[in-house]
Image (cartoon, rainbow, N blue to C red):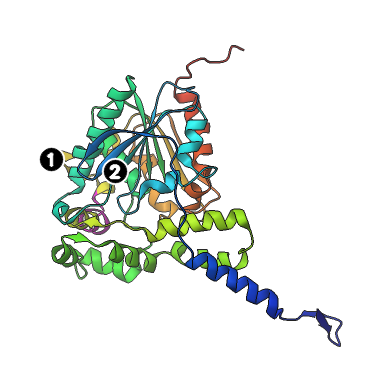
Amino acid sequence: MSTQGSSNDFIPLFDVEKETKRWQQVYKIVTGPKPDIIPTPREVVWKKNKSILWYHPAKEKKYKIPLFFVYSLLNKSYILDIGEGSSVIGGLTQSGYDVYLLDWGSPGYEDSNLSIDNYVLDYLEVAVKRALRHSGVNEISLVGYCLGGTLAAILASITKLPIKNLVLSTIPIDFSIGIVPNKWQEALQSGQLSFDSIADVYGVIPADIMYAMFRGLSPIYISPIVNLITRAYDEDYVDKWRRMDKWTKDATPFSGAAFQQLFNDLFKENKLVKGELMIGGMEVDLHNIKCSLFVLSTSRDTLVLEPQSLPIMDLVSSVDKTYQVVEAGHVSLALTGKFAVFADKWLSSRSEELHPAIS
């Protein structure tokens, strides 16, 4: 229904019944049970403390070189395997890759002293060794997402392990640029603001504090509600929305020692870009990275801005290196499974096809 004004403009009337149904649907979605996340077929290869190394075999193996995924310490890794039709892991196994995924797990109070050094050397490097042994191959492709990409780059710069390809997506490298408010950044860099006391008090930062911190810093935790209101009757969108909503609220605790390193060595001192970061007594020099490199940024990322990622292209020594910006957001790149498509396109010619087609 509508009314016609003197200027012949059409002015739509507010449809009470339709809007009531819309809000009832939104309420039902928001308050209903969280969806079950069914992972791509997998098996456990290795465990250490709370961490698990998962092996996802290719549906029909096409490539010799397996992929090893490392996700951020700040969130849970199942965003990479969020459900059939949207899974990054599932998309790549479908394309013919064997995939390994390191699930960091959730640290308990007894893990308060776990540092970034421990995570890189005692967990990530050891897990890559186990994946190499399990796969029986001589090389592997290391794939890092978000802060997991930072850890992957750190490892690649100091390890002697045979990393053939390094794929980094939405990766923070230059921590002088970011989503932290300018006043916070200035106070942090000048020493007026410190997060050490939080780590000292809690030992392990509780999940609800980590969630609140990042909810306040990034609109990825707010804009989905607006989108849900406008698309509440789109079943495919609602299904993805419910999965993302579960993941964003399913925060993980953070060890105090790693938390202090993250803010002091990276956000405050920006040591990675400066070449001053030390891990296990070794200098992290990104120039040591010589393997093939693919860096992916997203145009609508509000959590890791493109200028944070781009500097790595000039810091590495790789001859074969590619940088690409795609139309997506920080989370939607994984949530929609698009990352699998871009990764496959780049990796396919660098992963040794088992039975290459004869032209």
Split into 4 quadrants, where in the image is the C terminus? top right
Label 1 belongs to which residue?
A: 281
Taking depth in this image into account, of 135 and 193 the one nearest to the observer is 135
Residue at 42% x, 49% y: name it: 79
Could you say whether the residue bearing mark 1 is in a helix, strand or loop? Answer: loop
Crowdedness near tag 1: few (<14), some (14–19) or many (≥20) residues, C-alpha within 10 Å: few
Q: Which mark is residue 182?
A: none
Task: Work out which residue is located at the far bottom of the displayed protein and give it.
Answer: 6
The magenta region covers 263-271
Task: Work out which residue is located at the far top of the displayed protein and give it.
Answer: 358
Residue 302 visible in image: no
Image quarter for residue 166?
top left
Q: Relative to residue 98, is residue 28 drawn left or right? A: right
Whether residue 297 appears in magenta in the rendering, the answer is no
Above or below, 334 relative to 158: below
Residue at 84% x, 86% y: name it: 5
Amino acid type assigned to the residue bearing label 2 in the image: Leu
Image quarter for residue 292?
top left
Above or below, 84 relative to 179: above
Taking depth in this image into account, of 61 and 149 the one nearest to the observer is 61
